Amino acid sequence: MLLAFIKKDLLHLLRDKKEVMILVAMPFILITILGFALGGVTNQETKLDIAVAVVDQGDVAEDLQLLEEWMTCQNIPEAAQTHIKEAAEQSSLPEILVDQVMKKELSELLTVTEEKSLTKTLEEEKYAAVLSFPKNYRYETWKQQFFDAEEANKEFELFLNEENGLEANVVSDLIENFTSQMLLFTVLNKDVQMAGQTPPDFASFAEEIKGEKVTLDGKDPIGSFDYFAVGMSVMFALYVVSFVAGYAYHEKRTFVYDRVLLANAPPWLYGASKWISAVLVVFVQLCVLFGLSALLYKVYWPNVVHFLLITFLFSCVIGSFAVLITALNYRFETERISTMFSGFLVSILAFLGGSFIPWHDVSEVMWKIGSYTPNGAALQGYLQSMQGDTLGDLMDPLLTLGVTAVLLLVIAVSLFPKRRLR
């Protein structure tokens, strides 16, 4: 008899074309619209290929020779000259910044081209930034760095292309970060030099100036289609509650439920059929939506088992919700509760759960609140699974879903009428 009840519910859904459109077609349309329109809302990875020109009018060997001649004129001992030259060569800013950082560490982000003429290079619109080192720049800097000579009268220049605002800002931030690190190195180098010890290697400082993908919690980035595929899917799964509860009340109104009781079928069997029907409908609905998203928008899951586990538990929550709303409809002899659920509570839960807004990027408080809603817990579990989290990392959302499913079902059973209410 249970299988007959479930078959009846599923056939009724398939005959209701409007409901199928709401449960499958509508969320997929919204996934498409929001995925394209709101891609910048999420922390989707953006790949940059920034063209940078370097105009270097100096030469490290020539400047080292000038430094040696100057130290000889200043009567600096030869032993000290050797240490200073070694330190100077290691701290040559153009070589470290251009060769080690920009060309090596940030090769995936920057395309560095060495040019000869500064005037002609500035006329090139393809460059987001132009870095210029004047003649004898190293020599002047070393004198000021090691001997506290008068402030260097030569400085390197950075020209930014305003038409490439994002790329230019990236280069500007890079240079600012590098010069801060270089200043720290200079202070340490001077202290070591005065103590007569081996000068430190700047490589350890330069290693910190690397490009990296900035993502949610340092994990794999979540794209707009990834986020809204999950957000819209868990939101529209909630509409299954009102569909199942509304159809159940229709059966009560047409005396189907009374005939079930007259056939000596226990009320729990009827309630169980509604729970299983809702679970099956939601499970299939989510698999279809995520399957289409994977096929058309490359929304993939690193671990299918985690995906199926979250989907099953969330489906159980929706099934328990459906039985609870059905029980309330029966007990209060009205369909308004299921109508209010689909017209009001779904929107509230979707908002709190983060279906429309990625709360993690906006408000930690709202992100935490959303984790206690069934759809929010499912959404966060799905996102963690997308980022490759382990089963242990998923325990919080899984536990929330499991406890919610059981709690709602216990309340529903206590409210479900045992006989017809007059």
Image (tube, rainbow, N blue to C red):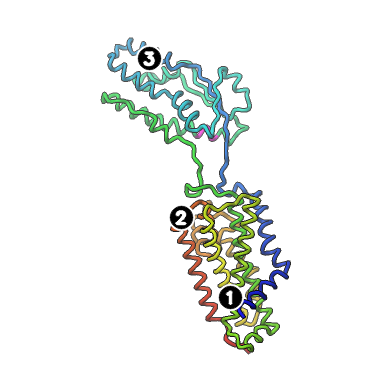
Residue 367 position (above or below residue 214): below
Label 1 crowd (10 A; few <14 / some 14-19 / many >=20): many
Distance from disc 3 to disc 1, alpha carbons, whole Å, reads: 85 Å
Give amino acid for label 1: Val
Magenta stretch? 169-173
Marks counted in the figure total 3
> Is residue 77 a member of the stretch shown in magenta?
no
**Image x and y of residue 313, in percent:** 53, 66
Residue occupying the point 62% across, 64% down: 284
The residue labelled by disc 2 is 390
Q: Identify the residue under disc 3.
A: 67
Q: Which residue ends up furthest to the left in the rendered image?
A: 195
Give me the residue at 55% from left, 35% from top: 169
Q: Are marks 2 and 1 in contact (CB under 8 Å)?
A: no
Residue 90 seen from this side: yes
- Say which element carries label 2: loop
Q: Is residue 164 left or right of residue 365?
A: right
The residue to which callout 1 is attached is 323
Q: Earlier in the sequence, mark 2 or mark 3?
A: 3
- Quadrant (top left/top right/bottom left/bottom right) for the C terminus: bottom right
Under circle 1, the secondary element is helix
Image location (x, y in percent) of residue 352 = 56, 61
Q: CA distance from mark 2 to mark 1?
A: 32 Å
